[in-house]
Amino acid sequence: MIGIPELYTHTEKIEKRKRLFLQKERCCGCEYCIEVCPRDILIKSSELNHKLTYPPMVKDGGKCTFCQLCEYVCPSYSIYVLEDVKK
């Protein structure tokens, strides 16, 4: 994979370490992920992508529960949760 930026890492009270990733250039700007987030941690960023949309970003101090609702509703498959693999 090429240049997938990490949005947020959170390990507090979670057995497995997970990360929320966003492929900004793939985002279509629908904002479904922002609407469906139960913790309201996602907001629209101020940076345009090549599709001239504002992809989401994590609010300062936001704590993701990694419920994956954002991943399930994303029509462009641009936001997802992955487990950290320790070597």
Image (spheres, rainbow, N blue to C red):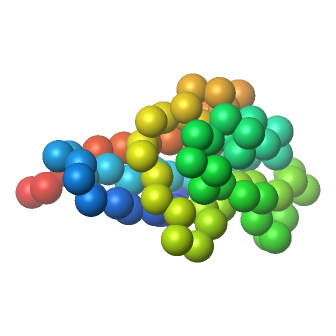
In the depicted view, which residue is nearer to us: 47 or 67? 67
In the depicted view, which residue is nearer to us: 41 or 26? 41
Q: Position of residue 38 (x, y in %)?
A: 58, 40
Looking at the image, residue 4 lies above or below residue 83 = below
Question: Which residue is pictured at 50% across the width and 41% down the height?
Answer: 80
In the depicted view, which residue is nearer to us: 4 or 63? 63
Q: Position of residue 22 (x, y in %)?
A: 57, 52
**Where is the C terminus found, in terms of image quarters?**
bottom left
Question: Which residue is pictured at 74% across the width and 39% down the height?
Answer: 35
Q: Is residue 23 something that shows in the picture? A: no
Q: Position of residue 68 (x, y in %)?
A: 48, 35
Q: Is residue 16 something that shows in the picture? A: yes
Q: Position of residue 5 (x, y in %)?
A: 52, 63
Q: Quadrant of residue 75?
A: top right
In the depicted view, which residue is nearer to us: 62 or 20? 62
Q: Left or right: where does residue 30 sit relative to residue 10?
A: right
Q: Left or right: where does residue 38 sit relative to residue 44?
A: left
Q: Left or right: where does residue 8 sit relative to residue 31?
A: left
